[in-house]
Amino acid sequence: MLTTIQNALKTKEIRMKLLYVLFALVIVRIGCNIPVPGVNSNVMQQFFNSNQSLGFLDVMTGGSFSRMTIFALNITPYITASIILQLLTIAIPRLEEMQKDGEDGRKKINEYTRYLSIVLAIIESVAMVIGFRNQNFFKDSGYVSMIVAVAALTAGAAFMMWLGEQITVKGVGNGISIILLINIVARIPSDLIGLYNTYISGAGNITNAILAAVIIVAIIVAMFAFIVWLQDGERRIPVQYAKKIQGKRVAGGQSTHIPLKVNTAGVIPVIFASSMMSLPVIIASFAGIQPATGPNASVFQKLLTVCNQSDWCKVGSWGEFKYTLGLLVYIALVIFFAYFYTSVTFNPLEIANNMKKQGGFIPGIRPGKPTTDYLTSVLNSIILIGAIGMVIVCVVPIIFSGVFGANVSFSGTSLIIVVGVVIETIKQIESLVLVRHYKGFLGN
């Protein structure tokens, strides 16, 4: 990786792309510290300190959500819109046709994604402003401050969407993913300082401090190594193409493979599961509803005790079914969405038909339905392995947070995003360096 970066910095064109990305990320971090006009930042910070369940949103926005800055919504409306449009392609034939139309169809879908992002940003900003206004977070109780706040939040989300697209076009990598990466990485130093103050500085003696430091480093390194394996792991299905006689030439006959990634659905299942579990807690936080389990508690209050991730895996809570149930529901949702999202994005029938049209076949498997059944069987096995891997990555931080009280913002979801974005960006830099190498070779 270091060699790739060194080679990239030697090339002026790639170096300028990297500098453009760096400059854009500086703008992102500056905007994440500019508060929305009329907001009492101190009260906001106290509210988020007492509501750890909102930490997932705060991590995704680089801490700007808890500070209620102009980038509080960040790129979350765009990510949500992208997922919605992708899921709608299986329900709306017109969108499915656009997706298959090549570059023109993708441009049209991207345009719809932008419009939907703005609509979602307006809806989310209005809901946030109304909810926080009821909690007396605004200095001015008039409607002017609410309108200004909605406009600022919506404009911030629109600017982040535009900046992400500019990074994709003029920089290196996927701009939206890189912004999400910097948001997560921005919170890691403060988390590491918190771990140091709690377990190393406050260990009492040098032996315990060294032991705590070794355990923390070992867990972090092991988690990253496991995620790298999970992201890069793939099952290669061999494909053989039959020989064809074209005039006096014999064409075809080559062997290739279909790469099926172990983590076929990426981080999407974890985001879906986390969002579904966090939604009731977020609504309750805005409405001022507290979780309760007594006989007079409402169904929604009892649901909050199950969905509140901060209570999972705490010492003594495993004997209480409500906390165990919440963790089990979360695990089930991750596995369900892994199968669901893969079924949306990967169609074994279409791949089998394309192979048959091009004269390709899997050795030992007949073309047509047997090939479809074989691909489906292999895919189901891989999805299960990938889903279990994602569950391990997500549950380990939850266990350490509950048992040892290690309150850190980076969760399994964050780690998967960080590793995935870094790997994909490095691969793109490598491809750019390789292209420049070949251009130079041909030029000589």
Image (cartoon, rainbow, N blue to C red):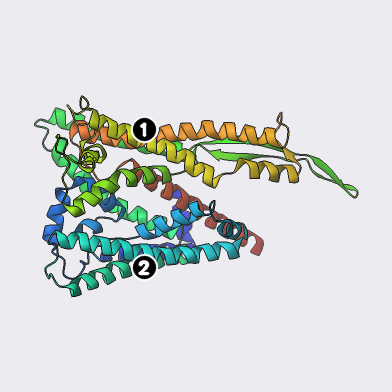
Q: Nearer the viewer, mark 2 or mark 1?
A: 2
Residue 212: give x, y in percent of width and height: 20, 32
Residue beneath label 2, please? 158
Frontmost residue, 136 versus 385: 136
Say what amino acid the circle numbered 1 marks: Ile
Frontmost residue, 283 versus 359: 283
Judge left or right: residue 198 versus residue 225.
Answer: left
Write the residue at 23% across / 43% down: 300
Write the residue at 32% across / 70% down: 155
Residue 390: give x, y in percent of width and height: 40, 36
Secondary structure beneath dot 2 equals helix
Say what amino acid the circle numbered 2 marks: Ala
Residue beneath label 1, please? 392
Toward which corner of the image does residue 322 lie, by quadrant?
Answer: top left
Residue 289: give x, y in percent of width and height: 17, 48
Frontmost residue, 378 versus 329: 329
On-image quarter of the C terminus: bottom right
Frontmost residue, 254 versus 103: 103
